[in-house]
Amino acid sequence: MACLHDHSCEDHDCSSDWSLYKHIDLPKVSALNEAVPGSVKSVFKAWEQRLNFSGEHLESNEGDPELLVFIPFTSDVKIKSISIVGGADGTSPSKMRAFINRDGIDFSDAQGMQAVQEWELVENFQGVLEFQTRYSKFQSVANITLHFPDNFGGDTTQIHYIGFKGEATKLKRDVVATIVYELMPNPSDHKTRAEGGGGLSHVE
Amino acid sequence: MVLEATMICIDNSEWMRNGDYSPSRFQAQAEAVNLICGAKTQSNPENTVGILTMAGKGVRVLATPTSDLGKILACMHGLEIGGEMNITAGIQVAQLALKHRQNKNQQQRIIVFVGSPIKYDKKVLETIGKKLKKNSVSIDIVDFGEEDDGKPEKLEALLASVNNNDSSHIVHVPPGPNALSDVLISTPVFTDDGDGGRGFAAVGSSASGFDFGVDPNLDPELALALRVSMEEERARQEAAAKRAAEEAGGQDKGEEPSSNAEDATMSDVNVSAPEENKKITDSAIDGDENALLKQALTMSMNISGSGRSGGDAEMLEATGEDQELALALQLSMQESTGGPSSQSEENKLLGDQAYMSSVLASLPGVDTNDPALKDLLASLENQSENQSESQQKKSEDEPPNENK
């Protein structure tokens, strides 16, 4: 579904809507089949810079339009819609498939698995098109993997901007990072009530 | 310190029986694999390494990526050579094994040892390479063994199709005296970022850039101790040689063999042998070789206070190594009696002595601090002082020869 901005942007600050990029864990963003390793990080920027074609962008390898982008967030987010700005001359991606909260997906996994949602994309040179999500499925997203299987006929696929609209929660879905197992109880770890200042004790 | 999961693809085809890499291609490959496993696990404790064989009945995964070095080394035992190598299947299985690694944060790397000719087209290899590149797997190719016509080109093509930002490498190792593992240590297969493998490599092989095979960074005290003892030894030998050169008699010669033996115990034999040769050539005095020979006999027997003839006779009853020594001594003695000029005799004896010294150093029972030995040395020195002519020495050689 596409919605065009039919109001002037002075009234309502569009950029604040698209501020989920601030919650992206940028160092851990990765992509498969990118021509320049690390270039994927350049597509997550502020709304105002989405049409800035001059800087770095994400490009796939020659002759192979598939791209797989893994995006972890610093906290759980709810994603309402996604905006993609692709390159010219048929290098824009034509299809997008999303997977939620799974890491380590590669191309064979992506091709085999059922995506949470799939979209048919159109060329979006003005950067005004956004693709809505089935919001109920995107309620607590710790990481999202976007798979772009095809483009509009170009030799490579270029992506200049990926934007997420939604809300960030303060929650973290993260797995427990460090667990300390006690083999034997250490009394100093367990302060009893008597040591802690006492309390009422019942003697029956 | 890159976090990596590595799959090593071993070539165990029939071509690995060849001996152009010592001791055989397969052994050289196994050593290299062991070193690589060690280097990878040392550079980052969370690295994992797995092994698979490409020939034999088919591609077989011996170990899935694990950080347990013992398990990896254990599965290198009992590998059989046979069949033909299937490089494409091997790489694909390696890719699959890496895909199912436990820690998805690890970079994927495949190391392929290619020792036999490749029967696949360049095209096939390039498609495989592209697939590896797409899934961001790097590859290191070790080209050794068979020198096929198209083999290097095919492997270069494979490398070009995988290579992303210079993370993949190829190494061509021609057959030669250097061990396969030694050649590999200095290549990016080991060193990776440049300093990853070097520390390990220095420990792993003695043919490193460091003086005593010990990295001063890893073990400064040991390196220092070795260096100090080497310098002390050198100083002592120089002093001994100077004294020997100054004096006519062979008074100081007795000290040389004992110092030589000590030398060997403290540092490499290879390092000490040339020095011994130098010392011996510096003081070219006839009568001393005989004293040395006798010392060698007694030292090898580790007998206390035995006479010269006693030492000779018991020589024959000793172990095989001592018998070789006896033979060498016998030859040298005969040469000393039959040689036309004293100079050439000396040279032959010198050669034998160098051999002798190195043999002595390797003999297990030699104890230079043995008091009996010291007595013997003293007695020999006295004997050599009494004699002034080389002719007298030769006449004394006759009775020992007759004893034999």
Image (tube, coloured by chain):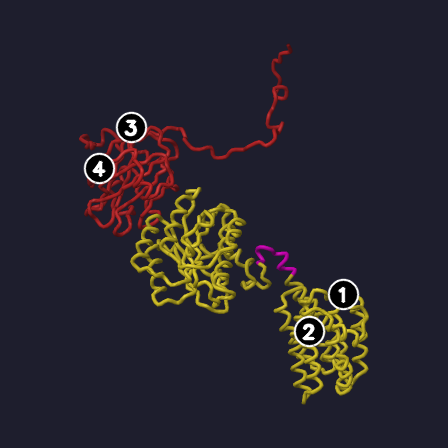
Q: Quadrant of residue B284?
A: bottom right
Q: Position of residue B277 (x, y in %)?
A: 65, 76
Bounds of the magenta segment: B215-225
Q: Position of residue B261 (x, y in %)?
A: 70, 68
The answer to whether residue B264 is above or below residue A19 is below
| Placement of the C terminus of chain A among the 4 image quadrants | top right
Residue bearing mark 3:
A135
- Mark 2 residue element: helix
Residue bearing mark 2:
B325
Q: Which of marks 2 and 1 is nearer the N terminus?
A: 2
Q: Residue B369 carries which label?
A: 1
- Mark 1 residue element: loop
- In-image side of A157 versus A179 (left or right): left
- In-image side of B92 versus B197 (left or right): left
The answer to whether residue A130 is above or below residue B368 is above
Q: Earlier in the sequence, mark 4 or mark 3?
A: 4
* Three-letter amino acid code of the residue under disc 2: Leu
Tags 1 and 4 on a common chain: no
Tags 2 and 3 on a common chain: no
Q: Residue B261 magenta-drawn? A: no
Tags 2 and 1 on a common chain: yes
* Three-letter amino acid code of the residue under disc 3: Tyr
- Mark 4 residue element: strand
Q: Which chain did the image draw in red?
A: A
Q: In which quarter of the image is residue B270?
A: bottom right
Label 1 marks a residue whose chain is B
Q: Do the residues labelled 2 and 1 touch (CB within 8 Å)?
A: no
Query: Cα distance, mark 1 to mark 4?
Result: 89 Å
Q: Residues within 10 Å of mark 4 (few under 14, many from 20)?
A: few
Q: Nearer the viewer, residue B403 or B337?
A: B403
* Three-letter amino acid code of the residue under disc 1: Asn
